[in-house]
Amino acid sequence: LAACAGVGLGGLCVALSGAPPVFALGTGALGLCLPSLQLSRTGRQRVSRIAGRLPHVVDMLVLSLGAGLDLLSALRQVVERAVDPQSEVIEELGLVLEELKLGHTRQRALERFAYRAPCEEVRDLVAACIQAEEQGTPLAVVLQAQVTTSRQRRSARAEETASKVSTALLLPLLLILSALLILIAGEKGVWNGSAGATFA
């Protein structure tokens, strides 16, 4: 539909402005690509929001597991008592709960969660849960270590982004400074020229 709309819009522009007919094909190709680009952008934003909220959710899971609940009960507590039940990470945990209720294994449900939200934080969480189940390690201890690592990684990523931004701002600042120096030099030249003409 978007491709057809692009071709139609391009054809209208060709008819009105006399542009070459290949312009209609170009707008059709653009219309064909736009929905996929928008969908990819929406997916990246969703995964980013899941990664941002996941450490807080894992903290709640650790508290629930420390109180003596198993993983299923802890997930249910987190989903039912969430401050924002419409958030993406709560929605994904709700899907994990539904799959566990339907009889899927814990590993299968968690792997599907990692497939739906392909980011490093979710993959680390899933790997930690599966490893704890296989080795018999207390899940609360493993999750606590994982969320600490996740927070350290986020801090390092934020520092890296800040350093990149400061480096990217250096070139515009140099351009602005150069333009100001040129303006000042031009003003001085004009002032000196006018002063010399007045003296003469």
Image (cartoon, helix red, strand yellow):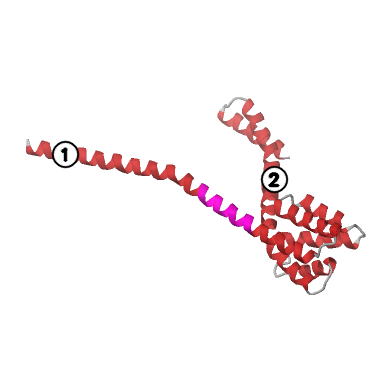
- Residue 153 on the magenta span: yes
Residue 169 is situated, as x and y percent measured from the top left of the image, at: 45, 46
- Residue 87 appears in view: no
Q: What is the quadrant of residue 5 in the picture?
A: top right
Residue 192 numbered tag: 1
Secondary structure state at the residue bearing disc 2: helix
Residue 78 is situated, as x and y percent measured from the top left of the image, at: 76, 68
Q: Measure the C-alpha gap from mark 1 to mark 2.
A: 59 Å
- Residue 138 on the magenta span: no
Residue at position x 60%, y 25% in the image:
20
Residue 153 is situated, as x and y percent measured from the top left of the image, at: 63, 55
Residue 106 is situated, as x and y percent measured from the top left of the image, at: 86, 58
Residue 45 numbered tag: none
Q: State if disc 2 and disc 1 touch (CB < 8 Å).
A: no
Residue at position x 59%, y 57% in the image:
155
Q: Nearer the viewer, residue 138 or 108?
A: 138
Identity, as a three-letter code, of the amino acid under mark 2: Ser
Mark found first going from the N terminus, 1 or 2: 2
- Give, as a single range, the part of the protein colored magenta: 152-164
- Residue 144 appears in view: yes
Residue marked by disc 2 = 40
Residue at position x 80%, y 66% in the image:
75
- Image vertical order of residue 7 relative to residue 169, above or below: above
